[in-house]
Image (spheres, rainbow, N blue to C red):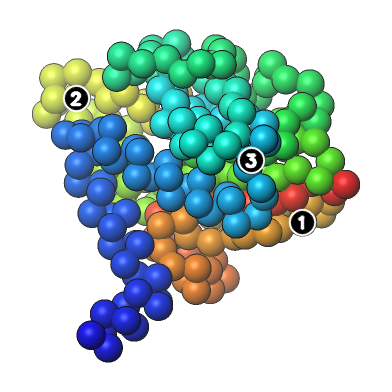
Amino acid sequence: MLFVRLFRKAGLVRSVRLFRSFLTEQTEPRGFYGLIADDAVDLVAAHVDLAGATVADFGGGPGFYSEAFRRAGARTILIDADLDEIQLHGRRTPGSVVGLAQQAPLADGAVDVAFSSNLLEHVRDLGEVADEIVRVVRPGGVAVLSYTIWLGPWGGHETSPWHLLGGHRAARRYERKAGHPPKNVFGTSMFPASVADGQRWLASRGDLEVLDLRPRYLPRWSSFLLRIPVLRELLTWNLWIVVRKPA
């Protein structure tokens, strides 16, 4: 019992549950994405009251995150570049529009919260898109940026872990094995995003208050990893950034 209590106190129960859920991504996507989305909304709710808030869900695809935000009392606008993604799993979220994150179809300061999960590893210029996401947040509002780290175990998405031997090589191997190219094409729709990329962007935005910065799926105390070059790229898996725009 003492071991279990220590395990819970360290935040490891949550981490184990999240990592185990990755095993069901392909077989039970609704359950997997529902769990991940609920967990993300819980993390966001620690910084902002979501009841009545307007949330822009960038790259939200079939809307699992938007759905979780609405359950928390928020209103949502979902923006995704791919109509097929929006209609994935036979669903289309109310308030969803086709659009590019780097050209967001929203006015300056239009929303209380701007949220993006696993989007920034799919754009060429991470900083440019992060700036655009922050642009649509009202003064005093919050932006949440979460993305997969290339050198982590899931950095190549469906081509993992072979992406660690090279993105193009992993794509060729995947096509030989699967009989078709991967959905995420290295150098075209997937890029080697790093922890250092996010840290450089934060350093360039001295106007933003950093509310949270950590490996997304690990306990909060693991944030010390972000201070260790190389190790942070291998172990972070997914970087979680929460910033507040100045009022």
Residue 203 visible here: no
Task: Give neighbour class at mark 3: few <14, some 14-19, many 20+ (Cα, 10 Å).
Answer: some
Residue 221 visible here: yes
Identify the mark nearer the N-term, 3 or 1: 3
To which residue does mark 2 refer?
A: 175
- What amino acid type is highlighted by mark number 2? Glu
Give the quarter of the image for residue 116. Answer: top right
Residue displayed at 28% across by 32% down: 30
Mark 1, secondary structure of its residue: strand
In three-dimensional space, the C-alpha distance between marks 2 and 1, rounded to whole angstroms, equals: 44 Å
To which residue does mark 1 refer?
A: 209
Residue displayed at 23% across by 54% down: 20
Spot occupied by residue 89 in the image (x, y as percentages of width and height): 29, 19
Instruction: Please count the marks in the image.
Output: 3
In the image: residue 203, left or right of residue 58: right
Question: Which one is in front, 134 or 65?
Answer: 65
